Image (cartoon, rainbow, N blue to C red):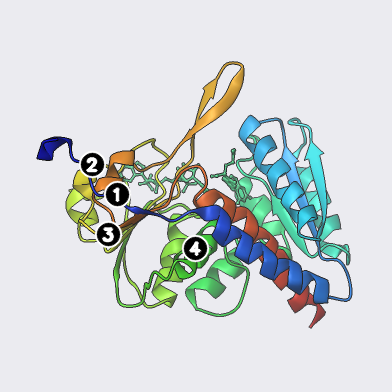
Amino acid sequence: MTAADAPAASARVLAGPPAAQALLDDTARRAARLPFTPEIAIVRLGEDPASVSYVRGKDAKAKETGLNSTVHALPDATTEAELLALIGQLNTDPAVNGILVQLPLPAHINEERVLNAIDPDKDVDGFHPVNVGRLWTNTPGNVPCTPQGVMFLLRHYGIEVAGRRVVMIGRSNIVGRPMAGLLVNAHATVTVAHSRTQDLPAVTREADILIAAVGRAHFVTPDMVKPGAVVVDVGINRVERPGKKPRLLGDVHPDVASVASALTPVPGGVGPMTIAQLLGNTVAAAERQRA
Ligand SMILES: NC(=O)C1=CN([C@@H]2O[C@H](COP(=O)(O)OP(=O)(O)OC[C@H]3O[C@@H](n4cnc5c(N)ncnc54)[C@H](OP(=O)(O)O)[C@@H]3O)[C@@H](O)[C@H]2O)C=CC1
Ligand SMILES: Nc1nc(=O)c2c([nH]1)NC[C@@H]1CN(c3ccc(C(=O)N[C@@H](CCC(=O)O)C(=O)O)cc3)C=[N+]21
């Protein structure tokens, strides 16, 4: 065997399911300590296959964890006024501790108006501007599930963020921006890159921890990664295949495993953390509502 065929060093796999299970176990214990059963209301509009599949996953995990879960599956033609009326009812229903409106919403509905209508204390997605403000002032509130799940995963695997350079690729309200806020709160030095960033590979090569939430399959290539960096792949790019389950590709090219010291897989990385954190947020909201 020549040096050229020698297997490349391979990054440690930061598997989501064991970390997610640790979070779910803690969530189930906390739920069981409450004098009532915490309840999440999940609202979905239309039949987008990805949304149908995610909502099914969230509902099943909620029940497994000892929570009540109600799915409100509304037709695609639901008006914004009808959706707002449902949110109003869920806001005032004392049995409901958490509300999640699955995104994306159909084009005829104004997403901002809908998210702003959810009671911030029941907003377990943490998308309401009040919760965004709480995150950026480092005060208690509901925090978006995916970034908070990434923080849990890093902690679970003993990866320190304080004092380290983190580059976040993506600045969405769901992932990039709240991820940056959590990292700043955890004392990381944070750079947020996006589609207008000049010389992105030079920026990402500075990262001790590189987090990708771009939405483009295999976007992060080995030349963009500092040797030994930890790489977190948030991306989920669905490749539909007729008659088969869709293939899921991350935003990180698999060859990055030969440069990074640790890497989250897709599937089986950040995705399961998102769902576990949603239930964690629901129980935390129930605890605060009771206090
Ligand atoms: N694992 C999980 O639980 C979750 C996974 N996801 C997945 O994460 C990915 C990102 O989701 P989301 O944040 O909602 O996506 P958005 O499309 O809202 O945001 C993508 C971000 O990537 C940036 N971007 C796009 N192209 C480039 C480029 N060429 N160079 C640098 N930056 C670029 C955009 O920049 P700009 O702002 O300039 O347009 C934008 O900020 C998707 O694959 C999604 O499916 C999302 C939520 C949860
Ligand atoms: N209001 C709202 N809140 C969200 O949190 C939200 C949303 N809307 N819209 C869409 C994105 C995406 N998202 C995922 C959740 C779980 C997995 C997940 O469990 N993924 C598994 C695979 C699941 C499968 O096989 O399809 C994995 O990566 O291993 C992925 C993605 C939540 N989101």
Mark toward the start of the polypeptide (3 vs 4): 4
Q: Is mark 1 within 8 Å of ligand 2?
A: no
Q: Which mark is residue 7?
A: 2
**CA gap, disc 2 and disc 1:** 8 Å
Side of 256 where 276 appears, left or right: right
Q: Which mark is residue 153?
A: 4
| Residue 53, image quadrant | top right
Between the C-alphas of marks 4 and 2, the distance is: 28 Å
Task: Tell me whether circle 4 and circle 1 mark residues in contact (CB < 8 Å).
Answer: no
- In which quadrant of the rendered image does the C terminus lie? bottom right
Q: In what element is the residue under mark 2?
A: loop
Q: Amino acid at mark 3?
A: Ala
**Residue 189: where, in percent of width, then height?**
30, 72
Cα–Cα span, label 3 and label 4: 16 Å
Number of the label disc, if any, that sits on residue 10: 1
Q: Position of residue 209 (x, y in %)?
A: 32, 62
Disc 2 under 8 Å from ligand 2? The reply is no
Amino acid type, residue under disc 2 in the picture: Pro
Look at discs 2 and 1 and give the one toward the viewer. Answer: 2
* Up-down relation of residue 47 to residue 37 (above or below): above
Q: Amino acid at mark 1?
A: Ser
Judging from the image, what secondary structure is the residue with disc 3 in? loop
Asked if residue 168 shows in the view, the reply is: no
Instruction: Assess whether mark 1 and mark 2 are in contact (beta carbons under 8 angstroms).
Output: yes
Q: How many numbered discs, if any?
A: 4
Residue ID for mark 3: 229
Instruction: Say which quadrant the N terminus sits in.
Output: top left
> Mark 4 vs ligand 1: CB under 8 Å?
no
Queried on whether the Cβ of the residue with tag 3 lies below 8 angstroms from ligand 1, the answer reads no
